[in-house]
């Protein structure tokens, strides 16, 4: 049973997540003694069903309903803040609520206030008063890349409800699978719901291999209605997403005449962005209107998501029909053509009393009059939309992409890339700094996105979602968030037992050991520390069998911290540490490279993007080479056309060359740069150019740039010049490419 580890000492903090507006403790506990008498006169019927499920069926507490039950009473209140509720626990429990929805939230709070000790139930005496900050508190689920059964979707919704989420964004169509039955177009599920193979490993793995096996599935319209109804009983709105005009290969496999070329193509088993998208001719518009007609019958939600992201324009540029639409409507280019396309859908949905929402690319070419923007490429799209008077849901990849890695531990399962730890999620605030009260009123809230290219089953889905969903619930619900340390204590003391009781395969990344490598005054420090001081780990320092022995090194250890000290010489040497912890079944093998410039001070004249800033400048001189497939914390990421950095050798030295690593991942718009220029200086004022580099760009696919030379200086400056635009034929064509850099190794004589 859950909460078996709770003691009276722990109750100095609030056990409820998301944290309520008011939490006041009273001395003592209210004993249950096996049953609760419940006054059900003011209790909504749906709440009664949940009360029976939670406390009678799951907690085995006998419930006795009557008109004069004293243990649990419900009172409806008026003239309060939207979704207000209170829970007062003393000798009895009184729940006040302003709506059925807020009564349900009160029930979730009561669940989290339950104490179980030696099989006996009680409630901590306290007073809670609460209401949410944002009206859109969402979690997204992509069922196109990997399909999840009806019962799995219901479980996802059940877990959302515990933490007071109210919006389930259901991504139902994409290149790799069409997942919703449309009766007018049966081929969408007969053909579009199935692919014959799925790529193994990561998208960027070279050479690629495939699991050749038919894969797919779809939801019948009856199943969709069942899930929508199931969610509504938990006061969660299901917002469907029918992706357009891009990410449409599954639909085009079923109906190739909807594309610009009309070519027959299979449902792809490869992730990424594809050139073939919906054509803009009128028959495609009619098709999508007919699809949406059936979707509107199934989903009563106010908002309908139409995607709008990552739509390459190469086919439109060559399509006679699309070019005719541009001419006939006086459009400037293909970007305005997409805006026109979205506008047609916006007009259609508005006529039917619904609202269109799409990813922030729908801003390009002009925003449709009634559109709401979901901002995923940072906050910028949402800021622009709100300033134009459009409603916004913030979902930036920097904080809200739960398909990213969540720790620096090498044992983390394969993910798409990026790095979004629990602390980063907790920092999220949907309101941009500097917004006026009027501009703030256009921010509906936020949500996290679960893209499932690398999430093949429910076990992995839960691992990627929890506990990050708890951190996000704080950002979206709390009027005033407690500190991250307070949140961690509530999570550790109360919600680990709750998640365990619910059978959730949540991540223990918070407790994994972390490694930091740096140059010390007399050598090298390799520093291990636990992410949470109450969770210990054992350190077993060894050399990997394939790597050199650590002769000459000294190990200094203390409880959860270890330093490995070694004098740095010219020779490059690889090492490995094996670390076991009480929350991991397998030891973590940390590898690093000793090289002459490890730990050198590096000044980043050009700052990396905040989403991919790692540990700042130390990221590129920490001895930890960026892995491929890439992990966000190991690289510095830039979306600029100029990058400058300066390394300081601390004294005038004879430099014989350097090497620096770049990342190439076409699907993520990450490319090698066009050019690298190097300069040296003795005083950081007068610079001499060493020589121009060769091109290390797209054609050569070079990921390690090396330059040999001989000079004397204290400072080395590198100027990295990416291509100005991603060329045609590559994902993200026309955009500024991302440039990711890692280990900088400077050689001395």
Image (cartoon, rainbow, N blue to C red):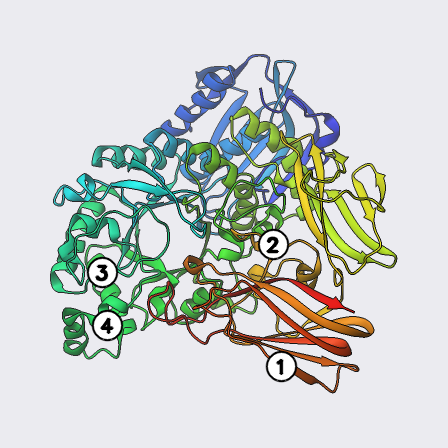
Locate residue 605: give its quadrant.
Answer: bottom right
Q: Which badge, 3 or 1, is on the more N-terminal residue?
A: 3
Q: Which badge, 3 or 2, is on the more N-terminal residue?
A: 3
Q: Nearer the viewer, residue 302 or 95?
A: 302
* Quarter of the N terminus within the rendering: top right
Identify whether 132 is placed above or below 639. Answer: above
Cα distance, mark 2 to mark 4?
Answer: 38 Å
Viewer-nearest of discs 1 and 2: 1
Task: Identify the residue position indicated by label 1 in the image.
Answer: 691
Viewer-nearest of discs 3 and 1: 1
Query: Is 268 left or right of 55, judged from the image as shown?
Result: left
Task: Identify the residue position indicated by label 4 in the image.
Answer: 317
Q: Which badge, 1 or 2, is on the more N-terminal residue?
A: 2
Q: Nearer the viewer, residue 425 or 568?
A: 568
Q: Residues within 10 Å of mark 1 (few under 14, many from 20)?
A: few
Residue 153 placed where, x, y %? Answer: 37, 34
Q: Which badge, 2 or 4, is on the more N-terminal residue?
A: 4
Q: Which badge, 3 or 4, is on the more N-terminal residue?
A: 4
Cα distance, mark 1 to mark 2?
Answer: 31 Å
């Amino acid at each position: 049973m859950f909460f078996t580890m709770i003691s009276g000492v722990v109750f100095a903090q609030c056990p409820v997540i998301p944290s309520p507006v008011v939490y006041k403790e009273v001395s003592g506990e209210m004993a249950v003694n096996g049953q609760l008498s419940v006054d059900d006169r003011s209790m909504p019927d749906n709440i009664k069903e949940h009360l029976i499920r939670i406390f009678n069926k799951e907690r085995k507490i006998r419930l006795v309903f009557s008109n004069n039950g004293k243990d649990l009473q419900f009172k409806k209140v008026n003239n309060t803040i939207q979704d207000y509720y209170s829970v007062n626990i003393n000798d009895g429990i009184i729940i006040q609520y302003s709506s059925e929805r807020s009564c349900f939230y009160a029930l979730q709070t009561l669940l989290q206030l339950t104490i179980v000790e030696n099989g006996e139930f009680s409630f901590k005496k306290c007073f809670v008063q609460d209401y949410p900050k944002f009206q859109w508190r969402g979690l997204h689920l992509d069922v196109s890349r990997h399909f999840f059964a009806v019962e799995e979707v219901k479980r996802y919704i059940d877990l959302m409800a515990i933490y007071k989420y109210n919006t389930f964004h259901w991504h139902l169509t994409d290149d790799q699978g069409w997942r919703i039955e449309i009766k007018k177009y049966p081929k969408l599920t007969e053909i579009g719901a199935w692919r014959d193979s799925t790529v193994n490993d990561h998208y960027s793995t070279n050479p690629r291999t495939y699991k050749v096996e038919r894969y797919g599935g779809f939801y019948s319209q009856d199943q969709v209605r069942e899930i929508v109804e199931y969610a509504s009983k938990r006061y969660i709105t299901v917002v469907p997403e029918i992706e357009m005009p891009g990410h449409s290969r599954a639909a085009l496999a079923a109906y190739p005449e909807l594309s610009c070329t009309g070519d027959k193509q299979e449902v792809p088993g490869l992730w990424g962005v594809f050139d073939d998208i919906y054509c803009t001719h009128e028959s495609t518009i009619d098709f999508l209107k007919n699809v949406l007609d059936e979707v509107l019958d199934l989903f009563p939600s106010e908002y309908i998501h139409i995607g709008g992201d990552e739509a390459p324009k190469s086919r439109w540029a060559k399509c006679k029909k699309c070019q005719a639409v541009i001419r006939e409507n006086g459009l400037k280019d293909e970007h305005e053509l997409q805006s026109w396309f979205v506008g047609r859908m916006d007009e259609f949905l508005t006529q039917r009393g619904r609202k269109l929402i799409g990813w922030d690319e729908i801003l390009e070419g002009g925003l449709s009059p009634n559109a709401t923007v979901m901002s995923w490429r940072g906050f910028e799209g949402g800021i622009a939309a709100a300033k134009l008077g459009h409603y916004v849901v913030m979902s930036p990849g920097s904080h809200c992409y739960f398909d990213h890695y969540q720790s620096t531990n090498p044992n983390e399962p394969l993910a798409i890339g990026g790095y979004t730890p629990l602390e980063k999620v907790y920092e999220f605030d949907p309101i941009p700094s500097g917004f006026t009260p009027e501009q703030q009123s256009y921010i509906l809230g936020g949500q996290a996105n679960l893209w499932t290219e690398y999430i093949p089953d429910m076990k992995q889905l839960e691992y990627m979602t929890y506990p990050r969903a708890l951190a996000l619930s704080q950002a979206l619900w709390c009027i005033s968030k407690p500190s991250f340390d307070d949140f961690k204590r509530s999570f550790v003391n109360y919600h680990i037992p709750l998640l365990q009781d619910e059978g959730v395969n949540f991540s223990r990344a918070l407790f994994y050991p972390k490694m930091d490598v740096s140059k010390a005054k007399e050598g090298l420090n390799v520093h291990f520390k636990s992410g949470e001081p109450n969770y210990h780990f054992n350190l077993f320092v060894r050399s990997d069998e394939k790597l050199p022995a650590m002769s000459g090194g000294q190990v200094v250890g203390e409880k959860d911290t270890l330093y490995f000290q070694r004098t740095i010489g010219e020779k490059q040497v690889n090492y490995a540490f094996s670390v076991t912890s009480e929350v991991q079944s397998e030891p973590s093998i940390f590898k690093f490279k000793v090289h002459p410039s490890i730990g050198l001070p590096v000044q980043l004249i050009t700052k990396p993007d905040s989403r991919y800033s790692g540990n700042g400048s130390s990221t590129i001189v920490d001895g930890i080479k960026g892995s491929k497939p890439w992990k966000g914390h190991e690289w510095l990421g830039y979306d600029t056309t100029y990058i400058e950095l300066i390394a300081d050798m601390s004294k005038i030295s004879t430099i014989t060359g350097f090497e620096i690593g770049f990342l190439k991942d076409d699907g993520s718009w990450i490319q090698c740069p066009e050019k690298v220029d190097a300069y040296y200086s003795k005083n950081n004022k007068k610079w001499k150019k060493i020589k121009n580099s060769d091109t290390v760009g797209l054609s050569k696919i070079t990921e390690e740039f090396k330059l040999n030379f001989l000079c004397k200086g204290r400072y080395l400056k590198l100027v990295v010049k990416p291509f100005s635009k991603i060329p045609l034929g590559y994902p993200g064509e026309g955009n500024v490419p991302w440039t990711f850099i890692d280990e900088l190794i400077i050689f001395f004589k």
